Amino acid sequence: MAKVLMKGNEAIGAAAIAAGCKYFFGYPITPQSELPEYMSRELPKAGGVFLQAESEVAAINMVYGAAGAGARVMTSSSSPGMSLKQEGISYLAGAELPCLLVNIMRGGPGLGSIQPSQTDYFQATRGGGNGDYRMVVFAPSNVQELVDLIIEGFDIADQYRNPVMILGDGMIGQMMEPIEFKAPIKRELPVKDWATVGTGGKRKPNIINSLYIAAEALEEHNIKLQAKYKTMNETEQRVESYNIEDADVVIAAYGTTSRIAKTAIAKLEKEGYKVGLIRPITLWPYPYNEFKKINPNCKGILTVEMNNGQMIDDVKIAVEGKFPVSFYGRTGGMIPTPDEIVENVKKIYGGEK
Amino acid sequence: MTVVFEKTKGLTDVQTHYCPGCTHGIIHRLVGEVLEELGILDNAIGVAPVGCSVFAYNYFNCDMQQAAHGRAPAVATGIKRVHPENFVFTYQGDGDLASIGTAEIVHVAHRGEKISTIFVNNAIYGMTGGQMAPTTLIGQKATTAPFGRTEEHSGRPIKISEMLSTIHGAAFVERVAVNTPANIRKAKKAIKECFQIQLDGKGFGIVEVLSTCPTNWGLTAPESMKWLEENMIPYYPLGNFRRPGEDE
Ligand SMILES: Cc1ncc(C[n+]2csc(CCOP(=O)(O)OP(=O)(O)O)c2C)c(N)n1
Ligand code: SF4
């Protein structure tokens, strides 16, 4: 198929429709509004329904209803809106309903700014809603990957009966890049025989629910959920790494910052430095094992994020104290420059190459 | 032997957990009977709230989803948009619908969403132990209004039916009570009419049912019926507020 030039937010919509998404419930917020706008225009043409909800709270609960009714459904928002969706996300996880969630992050806390950020890492990976739940969180770093992961994300959601999140930022949402719609890997997906579609008089009623009032029953439900998360953890980790087996310094970065890190690495290599990169594609499950491949003589790991240090916690868990871990981040919509990263890598070298 | 009275097929054989004298049971039965009589049980998808009727998903003999506190109208919207041919209803208490979920109920009416809502107004939070609801009457005691509700502190009790009847998309709004056999018959008639309006594709319908909470009102079952009649009905007048086409 020929490549087309598309803006990230619109590419998400196109990818979702290509993945067979039929329902979109959302509420406007910058910098992701082009996505609901695109869906309002394109989804009806594909035989689907776009509905602008009265709030993010309503939108995610519409997603819950539609997912429970057996549909391929998604919603999107940006940071403050995603905070409002946490209640519904917890319910979706509790009731084991598949759906795709997109967070195109902006700066916070509170109303923050409309510029790109990566400040919702904790919320996305630790479960911003109540309860012990997990979901696959993808952090694409270019528009092509965004498209590929949206398509896969729907399948993963259906396979595990669990919400899946795409965690992007204002940069990737607003950026235009050439993309290609590839045929996705076909997964064997389970039949949605649990969905509420009306009994048709042919079976006992189906119930979508996250309430288990007896302690034993709730524990049992949680044990079942944890077993599912364990399988997800073992099978869905994605990571890209570069040169980590013989690097002196390894940069850990995801999404937009990983692209800037790549530019910094190219500069450093020209000057004779040996710098590697670990780019988690899934932020949960986190690719901890990849860090075991790092050169044992590595001088240190530099975590780069557009926040004040959130993924650095996972990096520290991953390196198990074997290497010093340092952090460089910009916030408020400020984006780290390649030169700033170069400077921080050189600090780890401490003058000696 | 001729059968003169049967349990409705609209309810499952599960024993309900409602307190003795609570009218949630009567309202369930009416909804079950109407679902059966309209022949829509096989096609219905219900949404249960939080509150005492949270287990409604075990009681109605049709597909059911449980919703977060107050969000049943949004959940029902999602279901209805996916399955416009199915009959979709919510069953909600007054804490659920008139407090945390006011935005959701207003907007489901505003959109003219083709769903039906049974709104059980017992003027208190039952399940959580008798706290004040937006519908708690002036002077009525609740665990969070121990000296009785005052207008100065908490405003006057909200009249949901009157409020929703100002919204164009609300095709059917009626308030009923289940305190006497005659009122129970009227309540059933209203529920049937409300459900029919959805089946006819005319928009959103709601039946507000004045209900009792003997446990948290601290009254016996017969006293509760009397209290409902003497205190609730004067403030929450019964009757129809809207039928399709009334503000064209
Ligand atoms: C987000 C959230 N807040 C609070 C609660 C606790 N809660 C459960 S039921 C309820 C009140 C329900 O009252 P009402 O809707 O009047 O129903 P009733 O029990 O009287 O039938 C509350 C506050 C909850 N489940 N979820
Ligand atoms: S607490 Fe009140 S509303 Fe709840 S079941 Fe008991 S009597 Fe009914």
Image (cartoon, rainbow, N blue to C red):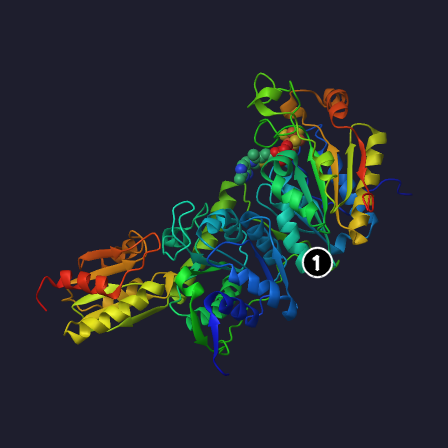
Task: Identify the image quadrant of the C terminus of chain A.
Answer: bottom left
Chain letter, disc 1 residue: A
Q: Which residue is drawn at 59% across and 24% down?
A: B154
Give the number of callouts: 1
Residue A187 in the figure: left or right of residue B222: left
In this view, the residue farthest toward the right is B2
Identify residue for label 1: A203
Residue A72 appears anywhere in the view: no
Residue B239 in the figure: left or right of residue A218: right
Q: Residue at x 43, y 46 (%)?
A: A111
Residue A210 at x, y percent in the picture: 55, 48
Secondary structure of the residue carrying tag 1 is loop
Residue A287 at x, y percent in the picture: 33, 64
Residue B246 sits above or below residue B228 on the image: below
Residue A16 sits above or below residue A162 on the image: below
Camera-side residue of A18 and B4: A18
Q: Residue at x 82, y 40 (%)?
A: B190
- The three-letter code of the residue at mark 1 reads Arg
Residue A39 at x, y percent in the picture: 58, 64
Camera-side residue of B123 and B241: B241
Residue B35 sits above or below residue B147 on the image: below
Residue B111 at x, y percent in the picture: 69, 50
